[in-house]
Image (tube, rainbow, N blue to C red):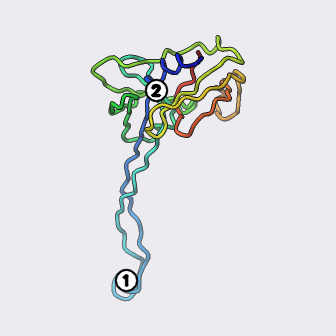
Amino acid sequence: DLTKAAEASVNAVVHIKSTQLGKVQTVQQPMDLFDFFFGNPQGGRQRQVQTQPRVGFGSGVIISADGYIVTNNHVIEGADEISVKLNDSREFVGRIIGTDPNTDLALVKIEAEDELPTIPVGDSDALKVGEWVLAVGNPFNLNSTVTAGIVSAKARSLGVYNNGIESFIQTDAAINQGNSGGALVNA
């Protein structure tokens, strides 16, 4: 029965919205016939345009009661604004504390008046192949999702990081889109 593990973890898994604000760019307009005959025969006019903001979503895990959240670096990479929504629908502004693109990890901080629910960081060395695990995420601001599976393998190396720091836990628990940064918990 994994209900206790699910109940103990869903409140510490958050939804993260990262926004990269639009940038002002100068673009060259194509030359029209009016410019060619009466204006600038060298080329078109330049004008400034604002690009659309880029918004990304993912999950994160509260690891300390004072608001530190671990997530994947690719969830918040390039973000100008970060919004963190808890499972109880409270929303906070997030601040990036640190990132490590080489291991795809990031640390975000929120300021709350009360203590926040947490998930303790487990010991992956003590994790056993065949052990039941839950993948807990908060995708698309829909509140938590929980899927179950087993640990299929440990210390997997996929060759995706150039620095050689790789030791992945392989699981057959379904990872929903938007779960990046979420938790993998055991019973």
* Numbered disc 2: secondary structure: strand
Q: Position of residue 87 (x, y in %)?
A: 40, 29
Picture quadrant where residue 39 is located: bottom left
Closer to the camera in the image, 121 or 146: 146
Q: Is residue 28 left or right of residue 179?
A: left
* Place of residue 43 in the rendered image (x, y in percent of width and height, measured from the top left): 42, 77
Taking the spot 36% from the left edge, 56% from the top edge, the residue there is 24
Identity, as a three-letter code, of the amino acid under mark 1:
Asp
- Determine which residue is flagged by label 1: 35
Q: Who's the residue at 37% across and 83% down the image?
A: 35
Quadrant in which the C terminus appears: top right
Who comes first in sequence, dot 1 or dot 2?
2
As drawn, which residue projects farthest toward the bottom? Answer: 37
Nearest to the observer: residue 14 or residue 67: 14
The percent coordinates of residue 88 (x first, y second) are: 37, 28
Query: Which residue is the extreme one toward the top?
Result: 126
Rounded to the nearest whole Å, what is the CA distance between mark 1 and mark 2?
Answer: 58 Å
Where is the N terminus found, in terms of image quarters? top right
- Disc 2 marks which amino acid? Val
Q: Residue 49, relative to residue 141: is it above or below?
A: below
Residue 166: x %, y % from top left: 66, 26
Q: Which mark is residue 49?
A: none
The nearer-to-camera label among 1 and 2 is: 2
Q: How crowded is the residue under tag 2: few (<14 C-alpha within 10 Å), some, or many (20+)?
A: many
Tag of residue 13: 2
**How many numbered tags mark residues here?**
2
Label 1 residue SS: helix
